[in-house]
Amino acid sequence: MDRKNPEVSVVVPLLNERDNIGPLYEQITQVLTDKYDYEIIFVDDGSSDDSFAVLARLQKQDVALRVIRFRRNFGQTAALGAGFAHARGKIIIAIDADLQNDPADIPELIAKLNEGFDVVSGWRKKRHDNAITRRLPSVIANWLIAKITGVKLHDFGCTLKAYRSEVLAETKLYGEMHRFIPALASWNGARIAECVVNHRPRTAGTAKYGLGRTLKVILDLITVKFLGSFSTKPIYIFGGLGLLSAFGAATAGLAVLYQKFISDSHLAMNRNPLLVLTALLITATIQFILMGLLAELLVRTYHESQNRPTYVIKEILESPADDGDEE
Ligand code: UDP
Ligand code: MG
């Protein structure tokens, strides 16, 4: 086995999953052994039970295991991010630690990836979670995410996904954003597929999320959409709103003048509520345009400070450089 360059890295974020780690480790190992060169990266996201002790014990017996331990709880997205950053495989699989995802689905995800996709997302078609706090919000959130990002998946929230490592190298993860990787990747030209996967009820440990996550997901969606569509041209959004309110200001202002000087009403200008609206919209116009310009400054700092190009190159064909000292 090639420890430095495994084909497959399995990344498992976990928080207080003491009783699930052993069985999960067995199941993953059973599925992958003899099929692939693989490594399993467990990321302990600040567990307060003895999850880490369990991991340490397993790691001593198996060179395919790597364990990353956070100093405190940073959240599932951060844990996945750390796992992705340390993964050495060309194919990276993310999977939950609570045994709700089934490692038996991994070969199918990999097979699909090898058909020529860059991300293959699991779809928990028969989901075993609370109907009111999890399944209903998830249906709505998935519909909304698909509509807004234009990426048609049924189950963005399913952790079980397979990625080509290049795809992950490009994405930085914030908030609850791991679920948007397929959308971000697809905007960069990646090909995305979906695969129905098994989903099992949780039998040990407790669920870490409730309804509150849906709100975070929706706020993240707004950010992702904004960054995806306008991060290099924020003035288009702010300036657009600015022009809209300028148009409103002009309309309201003309109406005030009309009512004062032309129509029969001869409404005094200082009694006319439309005058207040005009002033308000003029202020809004100025604010929007200035905010747009500020955003333009920020964008330049953002891209230039990180040396982030505003495009993604797939490959370059060229002849070897001519070093200029030919006779
Ligand atoms: N998890 C984590 N950090 C957190 C919360 C959760 O690493 O702050 C892990 C958790 O141990 C599990 C996975 O993320 O492996 C999904 O959590 P959970 O099962 O509670 O969520 P759900 O399946 O309901 O999405
Ligand atoms: Mg779960």
Image: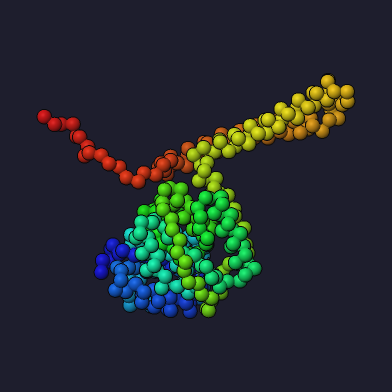
Residue 265 in sight from this viewpoint: yes
Residue at x 63% of width, y 34% of height: 242
Q: Quadrant of the C terminus?
A: top left
In the picture, measured across the screen, residue 257 lies left or right of residue 305, that is right
Quarter of the image holding residue 325?
Answer: top left
Residue shown at the point (52%, 45%) measured from the top left: 227
> Residue 147 vs residue 121: left or right?
right
Place of residue 180 in the rendered image (x, y in percent of width and height, measured from the top left): 50, 55
Reply above or below: 158 against 235. below
- In the image shown, does 46 or 163 lie closer to the viewer? 163
**Residue at the image point whose x is 28% and y is 62% from the top:** 5
State the residue in front, 243 or 83: 243
- Location of residue 87 (image quadrant): bottom left
Q: Taking 125 as reference, is 244 above or below it?
A: above
Taking 213 as reference, is 106 left or right? Answer: left
The image shows residue 27, relative to residue 169, as above or below, that is below
